[in-house]
Image: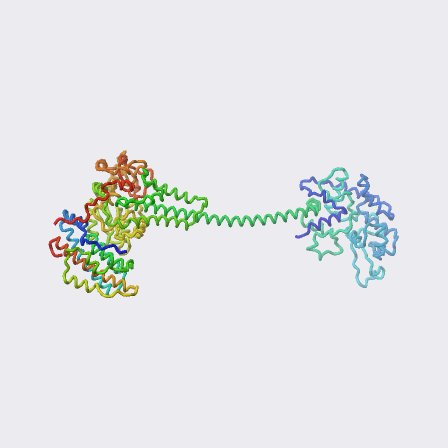
Amino acid sequence: MIEPMPVEIINWGILNEIISMDEDDPDFSKGLIIQFIDQAETTFGEMDEQLNNNKDLSELEKLGHFLKGSSAALGLQRIAWSCERIQNLGRKAEKSFPSKEQLLDTLPADTELTDSDKANYDKSNSGVPPTTDDDDLYLFLIKRALAQARLEFQVARRELSTYYNEVL
Amino acid sequence: MSFDPNNLEINLRADLGINQPQTESMTTRPPTEPPITLQPQQQQPIKQEMTPKPTIPGTTQTTFNNNKSNNNGAPSKPPSNEFVRKLYNILESNLYPDIVRWTDNGDSFVVLDTGKFTTQILPNHFKHSNFASFVRQLNKYDFHKIKKKPNEEQRSQTGELSWEFKHPFFKIHDVAGLDRIKRKLSNAKRAAAAAAAGINNGTPLPINAVSPGGTPIGNGTSASNINIHRNGRHGHVSHGHTRHEILNAGLSQLGITKEQFLSHTVSRETYTTLRKRVENLEKQLEISKNEIFIGKVENQKLNSKYNTVVESLITFKTVNENLINNFNILCSVLSQNGIKVPEGLYEQTNITPNDGKSISDNNNNIIKSEIQLLETPNGITSPDQNRMLSFNMLANTNNLLNNQMDGLVGTPLMKETRKDIQNTVLRKGFHVLLVEDDTISIQLCSKFLRKYGCTVEVVTDGLSAISTLEKTRFDLVLMDIVMPNLDGATATSIIRNFDNQTPIIAMTGNIDDQDLITYLQHGMNDILAKPFTRDDLHTMLVRYLKNREPLSEQQRMQSQPAQSLPQQPQQLSQNVTPGSNNTQSPMNQSQIGQMNIQPPQQNVQTGGSGRHTQGLVHDNNPSLPTLNMDDNLGVPMTQTPHALLADTNFLEDEHIDKKPHL
């Protein structure tokens, strides 16, 4: 059973604590966010590499776990949720992934998606799932989860840019 | 040397002229029996020989009757070599020249017709029933048969069937020479004669294996079948040596006298009885040996079974203790996170709700009850049963987790507890090792830790954590689980081999119930679920570092002269004095303040004992110092579910879903 996707893009309870550290150490939280953005983009690229070439599920599991940890630490809970799916699909602990329609419905109503967001999302999050039970099924599902993670990352990044009042 | 005692005994008796078995009264003569004087008996016949009796036909009868007269106390005795004298008289009188006569030389005699000798002479003059017996008697007097040589002139004189006998002193017309012809006396026969004398004197001797009539040995020649050497020397027995001689030779070879030999002789019946007894004893011995062997095998089996049982008991106890510890940790975590623990779970582990006792006491109760379980009438608990029990415990724990885990993550923490913990001021200077591979988590966590006054050292994998802890002691270790090189759980289990004191807290996003149990089984004290808030971290720090002296401080204090203070630091946040009422009264502000204004606590402990205690594991060390003022100290983990439910702030949540102020 897959736990439901959190509605809030950012868990402010968590992020506020980090931001509170800025009192002693200005830009502490922003520095972490910037590190995370860099880390996430790198990790997404590594996931693409695994999906397209090595097709190593255990590596995908590790990458998913890694990005889940840092995103969750910063309160970026929808990214963390998507990464957890990748992790669990990588170790075959889950065998399904919600449809993109279901997931898009969970986004806050005020969330605006850019055209490129939608285009990339649809591009990676399509196709007919393999009927077999082998790795291809999990790779297909991870590909969809990765598309979701990227979409969530773009949404969160925009919200964080709004909060810090600069383009991150 | 092998010989048949049974045969020997009978032959001896025959040799001694004993015709009636005396088995009823026969006993083995004790070796301490005083020696019997033999001289009179030996000398007496010699005296009589000095005056030879007139030889008349029928003296044999007289001689035999003489035995009876001896029994009646008559002093006269026949000469020991009467047999020879009788023969001499017959030859001298030349009554049977056609049957037996001196040879021409006069130094030997010849039996010309053995058949007539047997039919005419033997019945009248000798007691021998056949010629062979007569020859044997001659042999006993050291007569030797002269072997006939072919073409010898005597052959014509005496005929083919003649038997010529010779003795050095047995010569024609030589009466004096007869005195020198003696029966080859053996000690045994002397003893027999002596024994006979003893009977005659009315002094019964223990040994009756002799002729009751005191038969003169000289007449005791008969069908002696002495064959002590029969088995080994049968082929060597010649006509020139009687079996009696062989017996004597055998006895002398054995180095014992005939007397000694006889004194150790028992009757056939006794022998048979004894042999049967010996056989029975041997059988019993064999049976006993078998029984002993079987017993040894059984003993070994039982030993191995016992060892197996003891091992499983120890294993079980260890597993059980671990499970109880883990269970208590989980209960504590659940309680602190505001999750009600089902009462049934407590009942199963003998923890009664509202019980004022501390968990540690309950631990003991559980262990006791488990031991009682093991001491059921069956007595033996197989390892499988142990595993069953363990699995039951695990299953209980798992059920608890399954029921409650969903609510654990992101569940608002209990406000009351949080406030208390937040208000608990930790000492500065705790040295914390952060084992984490994610840079963002490292920065966050170390930032929080420094905020709480800790000094932080960071390593990014399990191997580095091990090597760092080998070199340096830390007050606390925060350990990620999934890391490169070596995961945190495995690293902890290795660290526990050399450091069983430093609290190690797992930081993990994997809050799979099975994972949690695994972490605890690896020796981790507690679990800090990722993502964690500042308060989550602080709660954990308070739990393990509250009232504790930072190691750096301890080291500094140790270098100074120690001052003796009556109040000792409380080593365990969970170290609740049994019987105290603290479970019902959570710690309040004033108490905390009171506690914090205590003078700097001296490290009165030696070594590292008690500085670190593992989580909720109660240290039973009686020397463990306790805080005198802690009677009312509230300890979150000791709060029962009822206490938690009674907390009105239980469901309050202040920190979640708060948007930052823009």
Could you tell whether B192 is left or right of A111 in the image? Answer: right
Furthest-left residue in this view: A165
- Image point 87% across, 46% down: which residue? B54
B382 lies above or below B590: below
Total label count? 0
Q: Quadrant of residue B618?
A: top left
Does residue B564 appear in the picture of this structure? no
Residue B251: image x %, image y %?
69, 49
Residue B169: image x %, image y %?
80, 51
Could you tell whether B312 is left or right of A99 in the image? Answer: right
Q: By what rule are the colours in the image chosen?
A: rainbow
Residue B517: image x %, image y %?
31, 50
For the residue pair B341 and B372, the one nearer the viewer reads as: B341
Furthest-top residue in this view: B566
Does residue A66 appear in the picture of this structure? yes
For the residue pair A5 and A83, the one nearer the viewer reads as: A5
For the residue pair B402 and B552, the one nearer the viewer reads as: B402
Q: Quadrant of residue B437?
A: bottom left
